[in-house]
Image (cartoon, grey):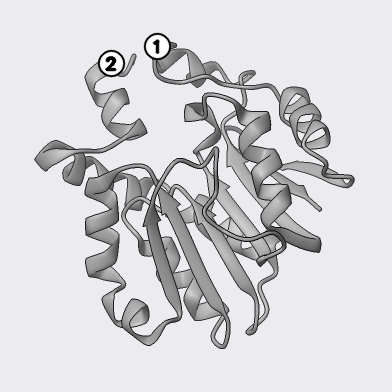
Amino acid sequence: MRRPEFIARQSARPSGILGRAIAWIMARETAADNAAARRLLEITPTDHVLELGFGHGHNVLELARAASRGFVAGLDHSEEMHALAEALCRTLIASGRVRLSCADSRELPYEDTTFDKAVGVHTVYFWPDPIQQLTELRRVLRPGGRLVLGFRPKEDGASKDFPETVYRFYSQRDVEQMLQAAGFAQVRIEALSPHVLMARAE
C-alpha cells in the first residue's frame, strides 16, 4: 500500500507529536536492520563511532554498549529526534561518552579522521547529494575505517510504495558506484533480507 506523502515526510524529518509516534514505530521496524549493521561494523570496545540519522536514539545506546571504552557521536537533522534521543541518552551524554548533534550531514561538524566506524541505516534516500555526504563520511573516518549503510534497493518492488517526492531509492550498483566515487576503495554489498541490503565500505 502506498505511503501517504505527509507520513513519508515525517519519516524523513520527524516533527511534533506525529513525528514522535512515527519515531517509536520506526524503532521497532528497524531494530533488526540496525542490529545487522552493528554486527558488520565489528565494533571494538575502544572504537569511536558515528551514526548518521540517529532518530529515536535506541541504536546510539547499543553502539555505546559495544564501544564500552570508546565514544559515539550521532547526527540528525530533526530537532524533535535530537531532543528525544538526548533524553534517552542523557546519562551517556553527561559522562562524555556520547555526543548528539542536530546538523546537516553535508558538512559534518567533526575533524578529519575522527572515527573508526560510521553507520547509517535507511538514511541515504533522504540525502540531497549522496556523494557529498559519503565524501564527508570518508573524510571523518580514519584510514582503514569502516562505513556500513543499510538500504532498501530500487529493485525491491516495495520501493514503489514510497512517494518519489520524499524518497529516492538507488540500485545496488548505484550505491557501489557512489561509495567508490566518494573515495572508498573496498566496497561489499550483501543481502540482509529480500528487502534490505547492507553495504560495507573501507
Question: In this rendering, does residue 192 appear at all?
Answer: no
Q: Is residue 11 above or below residue 198?
A: above
Q: Is residue 87 above or below residue 177?
A: below
In the rendering, which numbered label is found on residue 5?
2
Residue visible at 19% across and 38% down?
A: 15
Among numbered discs 1 and 2, the one appearing first in the sequence: 2
User: At label 1, which amino acid type do we have?
Assistant: Thr
Question: In this rendering, does residue 93 appear at all?
Answer: yes
Q: Secondary structure at mark 2?
A: helix
Callout 1–callout 2 Cβ contact below 8 Å = yes
Residue visible at 30% across and 43% down?
A: 78
According to the image, label 1 marks what residue?
Answer: 165
On screen, residue 5 versus residue 198, left or right, reads left
Return the residue nearer the eye: 71 or 165. Answer: 71
User: At label 2, which amino acid type do we have?
Assistant: Glu
Image location (x, y in percent) of residue 150: 59, 43
**Split into 4 quadrants, where in the image is the N terminus?**
top left
Return the residue nearer the eye: 78 or 175. Answer: 78
